[in-house]
């Protein structure tokens, strides 16, 4: 489904009253990738006091305080992800305890704040649903169809037009574009070819 996620993987480190907090964020396609992201961070910081985490992958939303007082780490981290409207995102914040307790409020601010800064560094990007279509048209409509598709490639992003081919009935060309723009393109092709062009969904 269309969604907003991080543009790149990123990290942010800060020192809060002697404790080191290092936040990591990454795009993930599924829960298994979120688990792999957590495992990689744990492997990179085996001596950290805590490895708190949160992720959102579509309807799957999970978090863990990993030994911190309940509600002071994982939940605030998830709230940061949700408030930014992000999906397919895994976040891990490791803490190296510095000897001074921060209290519940201080922990919430440290975990959510370090994650927010990591997300700022990562940036965001929109992921759109894409459909692949096969456009069929008689030989006589070839020029009109290709001109229309070339114009569509300039006006609609994302848009990919593959190399045209021909069979016994005429032109066959595959295109990939955003689902939201597919029906409009279908109508434009019908008008340009007076109904001669046929469009079918490939995948």
Image: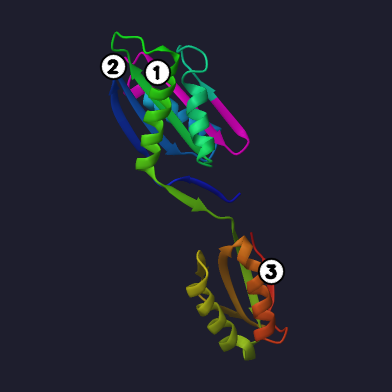
The mark that comes first in sequence, 2 or 3, is: 2
**Where does residue 33 sit, x and y in percent of width and height?**
49, 34
Residue 81 against residue 129 in the figure, above or below: above
Mark 1 to mark 2: distance in Å?
10 Å
Viewer-nearest of discs 1 and 3: 1
Residue carrying label 3: 200
Q: Which residues are magenta?
A: 42-62
**Where does residue 121 sit, x and y in percent of width and height?**
34, 41
Query: Do the residues under discs 1 and 2 have CB atoms within 8 angstroms?
Result: yes
The residue sitting at 45% across, 30% down in the picture is: 36
Picture quadrant where residue 97 is located: top left
Residue found at the very far right of the displayed protein: 195
Viewer-nearest of discs 2 and 3: 2
Look at the numbered disc 2 and give the secondary structure of its residue: loop
Q: Mark on residue 106?
A: 1
Q: Can I make out residue 46 in this image?
A: no
Q: Mark on residue 30?
A: none
The residue sitting at 56% across, 37% down in the picture is: 57
Within-10-Å neighbours for mark 3: few <14, some 14–19, many 20+: few
Q: Quadrant of the C terminus?
A: bottom right
Q: Mark on residue 17?
A: 2
The residue sitting at 32% across, 21% down in the picture is: 45
**Where does residue 84 sit, x and y in percent of width and height?**
50, 40
Mark 2 to mark 3: distance in Å?
62 Å
Look at the numbered disc 3 and give the secondary structure of its residue: strand
Q: How does the figure colour the protein chain or chains? A: rainbow
The mark that comes first in sequence, 1 or 2, is: 2
Q: Is residue 46 in the magenta section?
A: yes
The residue sitting at 60% across, 39% down in the picture is: 58
Q: Is residue 132 left or right of residue 41?
A: right
Q: Is residue 45 in the magenta section?
A: yes
């Amino acid at each position: 489904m269309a969604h907003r996620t991080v543009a790149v993987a990123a990290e942010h480190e800060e020192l809060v009253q002697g404790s080191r907090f290092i936040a990591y964020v990454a795009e993930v396609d599924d829960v298994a990738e979120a688990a792999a992201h957590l495992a990689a961070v744990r492997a990179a910081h085996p001596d950290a006091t805590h490895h708190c985490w949160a992720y959102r992958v579509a309807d799957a939303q999970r978090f863990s305080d990993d030994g911190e007082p309940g509600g002071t780490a994982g939940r605030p981290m998830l709230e940061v992800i949700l408030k930014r409207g992000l999906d397919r995102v895994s976040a891990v914040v490791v803490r190296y305890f510095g000897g001074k307790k921060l209290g519940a409020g201080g922990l919430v601010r440290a975990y959510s704040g370090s994650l927010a800064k990591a997300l700022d560094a990562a940036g965001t990007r929109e992921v759109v649903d894409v459909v692949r279509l096969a456009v069929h048209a008689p030989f006589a409509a070839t020029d009109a169809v290709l001109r229309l598709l070339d114009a569509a490639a300039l006006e609609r992003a994302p848009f990919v037009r593959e190399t045209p081919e021909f069979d016994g009935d005429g032109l066959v060309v595959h295109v990939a574009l955003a689902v939201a723009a597919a029906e409009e393109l279908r109508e434009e092709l019908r008008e340009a070819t007076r109904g001669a062009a046929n469009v079918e969904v490939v995948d």
